[in-house]
Image (cartoon, rainbow, N blue to C red):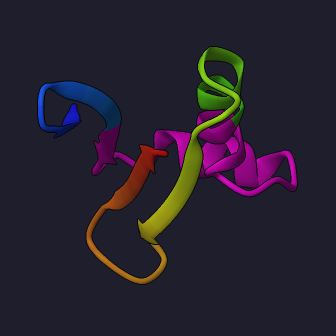
């Protein structure tokens, strides 16, 4: 969880497993769509920013915050 002083404002999601990638690609979807959907369901006002994926790095890294 990231903070702004004492206020909690976001979180960081990391994964190094390709199971989600494999399952979503077989359905013809982007592997980050399920993650973004879960975040939007919990906190629709938050930003969802992908900074690294298994396609261009060693992990999926998503930053979620205001």
Name, please, the residue furthest toward the front: 5
Q: Nearer the viewer, residue 2 or 28?
A: 2
Q: Which residue lies at the image location 30% right of the left edge and 62% below the top edge?
A: 59
* Residue 31 shown in magenta: yes
- In the displayed structure image, the side of residue 19 where residue 12 appears, left or right: left
Name, please, the residue furthest toward the left: 5
Q: Is residue 48 above or below residue 13?
A: below
Q: Which residue lies at the image location 62% right of the left edge and 50% below the top edge?
A: 32
Locate residue 5, reporting x and y percent.
12, 37
Q: Nearer the viewer, residue 50 or 10?
A: 10
- In the displayed structure image, the side of residue 37 where residue 17 appears, left or right: left
- In the displayed structure image, the side of residue 12 where residue 27 appears, left or right: right
Q: Which residue lies at the image location 64% right of the left edge and 40% below the top edge?
A: 36
Name, please, the residue furthest toward the bottom: 56
Q: Nearer the viewer, residue 61 or 47?
A: 47
Name, please, the residue furthest toward the right: 28
Q: Which residue lies at the image location 82% right of the left edge and 53% below the top edge?
A: 29
From where the camera sits, is residue 15 visible? yes
Which quadrant would the N terminus be assigned to in this image? top left
Locate residue 45, reporting x and y percent.
66, 34
- In the displayed structure image, the side of residue 17 where residue 44 appears, left or right: right
Locate residue 50, reporting x and y percent.
50, 64
Q: Is residue 41 above or below residue 11?
A: above
* Residue 35 shown in magenta: yes
From where the camera sits, is residue 53 visible? no
- How many numbered dots are placed on residues in this image? 0
Per the rendered image, the range of residues in magenta is 11-36
Q: Is residue 13 above or below residue 55?
A: above
Locate residue 34, reporting x and y percent.
68, 35
Q: Nearer the viewer, residue 24 or 12?
A: 12
């Amino acid at each position: 969880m990231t903070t702004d002083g004492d206020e909690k404002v976001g979180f960081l999601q990391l994964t190094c497993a390709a199971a989600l990638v494999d399952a979503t690609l077989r359905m013809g979807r982007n592997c980050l769509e399920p993650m973004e959907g879960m975040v939007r369901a919990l906190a629709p006002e938050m930003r969802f920013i992908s900074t690294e994926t298994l396609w261009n790095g060693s992990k999926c890294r998503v930053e979620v915050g205001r």
